[in-house]
Structures are given as structure tokens and as C-alpha cells.
Image: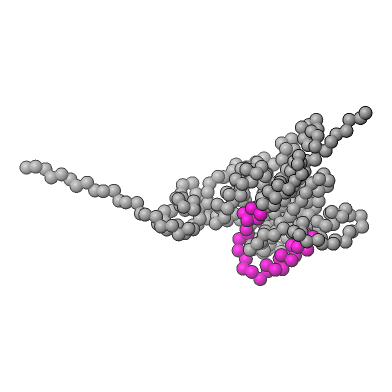
Amino acid sequence: MNNITLPNEISPDNTTLDETSLLVIILDSNPGQKMLRESPHVLTHCVDSIIAFANSHLMQKAQNKLAIMACHSKTSQFIYPNQGKNTDVRQVDGQYEIFTAVEKITKKNLAKLLTSENSTVITESLLAGAIAMALCYIARLQRTKPPGAKLNCRILVVTGSSCSASQYMNYMNVFFTAQKQNVVIDVCALEQHLSLLQQGCDITNGMYLKVPQLQGLLQYLLWVFLPEPPIREKLVLPPSLKVDYRAACFCHRQLIDIGHVCSVCLSIFCKFSPICTTCHTVFKMPALPAVKQKKKKKL
């Protein structure tokens, strides 16, 4: 009688045969980004590259799962898959139906988000909130997975925005939460170097890459971020840069070496202030040292 390998049986390389990889892609669609203000058509190029990259992830293994989020100035939403909605997508001849669904649903929901948020005031991107939503989504899938199944999760952030010191504590909270949940955070910076997100990659053992040329975005995504974290150790990838763990002050949004920290909300300031501008806590001014009176000499 031939031996039959059961779905939950351990294979010779100590990996389960029903191991699933979940990739959550966070696309920064905030029109306030410098590259989008100068060239709005860049967003179309980024979306097409991300869709091709997402389909490559699904093509690697039939069990792989995908989720795509759009991060805006006022909200963050899942644009794939549809949350609680059934959308009929007409299949394109010669194209795999899942690939067609990823492309059609992603572009449709992204266009709806950009149209609805077009009249709002453009502020900084809510990247920390988007990562928190992705972690909640991952936690829900971890609770509902079948017994014995293994779900490897990672988050890829694609952004051209700058780091915001006002979200410093939010960033640190989601970074250490991801580390506790064994979720890898990768960051693809399109415009400028992002020191805070680089810290998150280092904390969660993820990859950080500042794209040298935006025209080759898809090539960099496939080369650096498509392989799973265990496989990356065997590949020749760009060397990791030295991580700058300096904190950013909340007053001038600059990296500092030595500063003052609020004991209530842990806000960081480069100069002492009697009132915390974040939580409005009033601190006592340090008392002046007492002056000792000189003893009079006896005649």
C-alpha cells in the first residue's frame, strides 16, 4: 500500500503542507505627497506595479492570501478584497479570474476613495493607523484559521510621504505589536528616506528599501519584497542601512540626541517646556538651589 501524506502531516523539511502566506499591501494614496503634486500620473504607475506584484504573490502558491489597503489623509480603507460585499467581475479572456478580480476591484475601490476624499483638506498620511488596521485584520484571520494550519503574515508599506513626528507613539505601538504577533513589516520608500519606518523594519526583521528610480518600481518589488522572509537569507539583496534610532521631537519634528520626555504621554521635546503641548500637563519648574548665608565672623 502506498503512503499517503495527510494535509496536516509534517513534510521532510519541517514545514506544514497547508502553510499559507498572507500579504497585506498598504498603498499611500494621499494626493498631498510631493511626487503626486508634481506628477499625478505617477499614482497610476504605482497602482499598476502593485497589482502586478500582488498577482505574483498569489501565483506563487494557491493557498496564498492577499489584502490591499489605501491610506489617505483622513481615512484608511481596504480596497481588496471587498469587505462584506459581493462584486461580480467579468472575466477577461486569457486571464486568470483571480487576477482579473484583483485588478478590477482594486482600481474601482481606489477611484471611489479618491473621489470621496477629493474635497477634504489634505494633511499627513495616516500610515500608523493603516498598519494598526492591518494588524487587526491579521489577528482576526489568525483566530478563524483551521486547526493545524499555519498562517505567515507580513505587511508591505508603499509610500512617498515623509515621517510624521506627531504619529511617533502610534508608530512605536504598532511596531512592537507587530513584533509580538510575529508579523514582518516591509517598507518601500518612493520619495525620501523614512527613519521611523526604517526602525519598524528593523524591529520586525523586515526589509527597507528606498527606490532609486520610480520607473523600475515593479522590478524592485519583485526582487526585494516578493520572496518570503525565510528565503531572503539565501538571496543577494541590497545591504541593510544603519538604523537611526534617534527620536523625533514633537515641537520641531527633528531628530534629536538628547531631549525632554513628558512623564504622562511620553512626548519628546528638544527644549524644556512647563506645559506639554500634547496632553497639556503642567510641570513644576525646577527649584532654584538655596543660597547658604555666610556666617559672620566673630570679633
In the image, is residue 84 above or below residue 145?
below
Is the image coloured rainbow, by chain, by secondary structure, or in one colour? Answer: one colour
The answer, for residue 211, to whether it is visible in the render is no
Q: In this view, does 54 lie to the left or right of 285?
A: right
Instruction: Point out residue 7 in the picture as x, y percentages from the top left corner.
Output: 83, 38
Farthest bottom residue?
119
Residue 102, quarter of the rendered image: bottom right
- Report the number of numbered marks: 0
Farthest left residue?
299
Instruction: Point out residue 290 in the picture as x, y percentages from the top left corner.
Output: 26, 48
Q: Nearer the viewer, residue 278 or 150?
A: 150
Q: Nearer the viewer, residue 78 or 59?
A: 78
**Residue drawn at (72%, 52%) of the image:** 25
The answer, for residue 108, to whether it is visible in the render is yes
**Residue drawn at (77%, 35%) of the image:** 15
Q: Give the range drawn in magenta.
A: 105-133
